[in-house]
Image: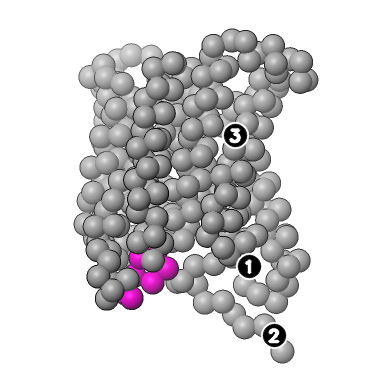
Amino acid sequence: MSQAVLSLLEHGFVQNAFLAGTLVAILSALVGYFVVLRAQSFAGEALSHIGFTGATGSALVGASPLLGMLLFTLLTAVGMGALGKRLRGRDVEVGMLLAFVLGLGVLFLSLYTGSATAAVSVLFGSILSVTTSDVIATLGCSLVTIALLGFLFRPLLFASVDPEVAEARGVPVQRISILFLVLLAVSASEAIQVVGVLLAFALLVVPSASAGHLTHRPGAAILLAVGISLACTWGGLILAFVGHWPVSFYIVTLTSLVYFGSLGLHALRFPRRYLGPPHPSREILPPAR
């Protein structure tokens, strides 16, 4: 199998798939750590689904799907970020916005007269059709997003763990919330290229949630999430090349197996504690007497 994979690496589309997958896996894990920490998984899921509307709208006018996804998700992220700390309790509003934007996506899709292949690729991922220009665009977006995330790391971590105290200390919590959701929008748009709209949650949340079961230290959790995301993405690509099933299926299957495995390890290490990643909004039950 290793010889077959090495021979496949000589092809340009395979190299592009691995490069794009690597960039998206790293970025998704870095941003995903804060998604889990801030309890904004539903917001991440909503942004990934809103990317479908952007992609179908761009296909309707003949533009790049990635450009459309970025435009729609960025506008939505700014709107969500305006809610600030109230976003955690606004699932109904976010759900209504998601339903409306998905309705627009259905309208755009019905007006689109081209091939249905583009829509299927957006829904389920099209990493094997990534071009060199797509890789360059993904690289540029990833570098800018990672740089901004590194610049915001300390205040973002503080605002995520204890927003009230952070605001009292002078940290601009609402502006940081808007900036983070913008970074999340970019990450969701890029994750769609790998696993599609319906499965982007797998890369944005599952590796970070799995890492949170295994360690409570931010640095270790982030590194572990990146490792899990890369391993699942590379493993999914290799299995897809030697098998006959879609890449997104393999990636989601691997991330799911890792997640349930991390739950089991957490249960072995902390048998009397609540089984879940640490989060300030969750109460850790004391050990049973």
Q: The residue under label 1 is which amino acid type?
A: Leu
Q: Is residue 163 magenta?
A: yes
Separation of marks 2 and 3 at Cα, in angstroms: 39 Å
Q: The residue under label 3 is which amino acid type?
A: Thr
Callout 3 crowding tier (Cα within 10 Å): few <14, some 14–19, many ≥20: many
Callout 1 crowding tier (Cα within 10 Å): few <14, some 14–19, many ≥20: some
* x and y, in percent, of residue 60 in the image: 26, 21
Is residue 201 in view?
A: no
Specify the segment rendered in magenta: 159-165
Relative to 20, residue 266 above or below: below
Residue where numbered disc 2 is placed:
288
Tell me which numbered mark, 1 or 2, is placed earlier along the sequence. Answer: 1
Quadrant of res 164 = bottom left
Residue where numbered disc 1 is placed:
275
* x and y, in percent, of residue 281 in the image: 45, 71
Relative to 138, residue 202 above or below: below
Q: Residue at x 73, y 67 (%)?
A: 269
Residue with the most extreme bottom position: 289
